[in-house]
Amino acid sequence: MTLEKRSSLRITTSVLFALILRELQGRFGARRFGAFWVFFEPAAQIALYMMVFSFRNISVRSGIDFPLFLVSGMVPFFLMRNIALQSMSAVDANKALFAYRQIKPLDTIIARAVIAIIISISVYLIFMFLLGFIFGYKVSMVDPLRWAAVLAIGVVFSFALGLLLCMIVDVFPDSKVFIRLLFFPVYILSGVLFPIWVLPADALNLLLWNPFVHIIDELRLATFPYYPDHVDVTIVYPFKVSVFLLLISLGLYRIRRFKLVAS
């Protein structure tokens, strides 16, 4: 009997598939109604903001329904936030698995990113279906290819950010709580809850340093037919930041990959 020698690609694929199944089981099978809680956070926040803004009679713009405006910003931001935060704690949560030499720290981070993508896309499609077929909103997408390209840049940016945060948390474990709290003001200042054109020019110029602002606004530009194109919003800026951050993060990972397993 001879054992078949597998290639490195097949080994990596098998490892990622096993890690993804493990993450899915842990996410949905660890507690009752696990799938419900995945959808509850965005649903509760969207419902809350819809009530607040409807009581104050605040609208976004003619031709853009406010619930669709919220979903188009919230769900992608939750995706990027979850990739970053889940990647930050991926290595620490899978320490026991590194006894198998086929499993690398980067594999656990990639697996968590894939799970976040699958869950967020499912949430987005379910919300759009409910808003379109049950509540009667006009659901459409002007440029699906542009939307997918912008979301891909957002995923790469958040993955690179999560990998960098993983290195930081490994050196400074107590910083994990502070990083999680830091994402709340980032959430508020990323144009998720409000259109950026309502801001004064000075405030907007400061916010445009935040790559999330460009990503969220570009996603909405690819979604709504009457969404205004702001002259200073561009996908080139978050693309450059994503590439730079990914190179830095991968470089740090290569330097510290053995310490991540040993620590």
Image (spheres, rainbow, N blue to C red):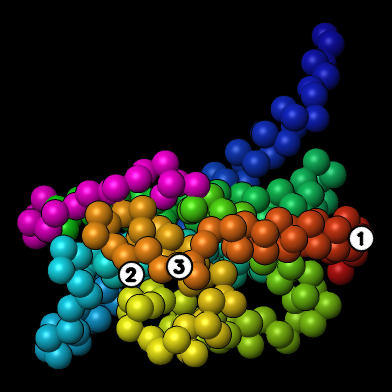
Q: Is residue 122 above or below residue 261?
A: above
Residue 90 location, quadrant: bottom right
Q: Is residue 141 magenta?
A: yes
Question: Could you tell me which secondary element the residue under label 1 belongs to?
Answer: helix
Label ID, residue 42: 2
**Residue 168 position within the rendered picture, expressed as x and y whole percent measured from the top left:** 77, 75
Query: Disc 3 marks which residue?
Result: 231
Q: Which of disc 2 and disc 1 is earlier in sequence?
A: 2
Amino acid carrying label 1: it is: Ile
Q: Is residue 83 above or below residue 25?
A: below
The residue nearer to you, when weighing 251 against 90, is 251
Q: How many marks?
A: 3
Q: Which segment is the magenta one?
A: 133-149
As drawn, is 97 to the left or to the right of 251?
A: left
The residue nearer to you, when weighing 17 against 231, is 231
Question: Could you tell me which secondary element the residue under label 2 belongs to?
Answer: helix
Q: Is residue 125 above or below residue 43?
A: above
Q: Quadrant of the N terminus?
A: top right
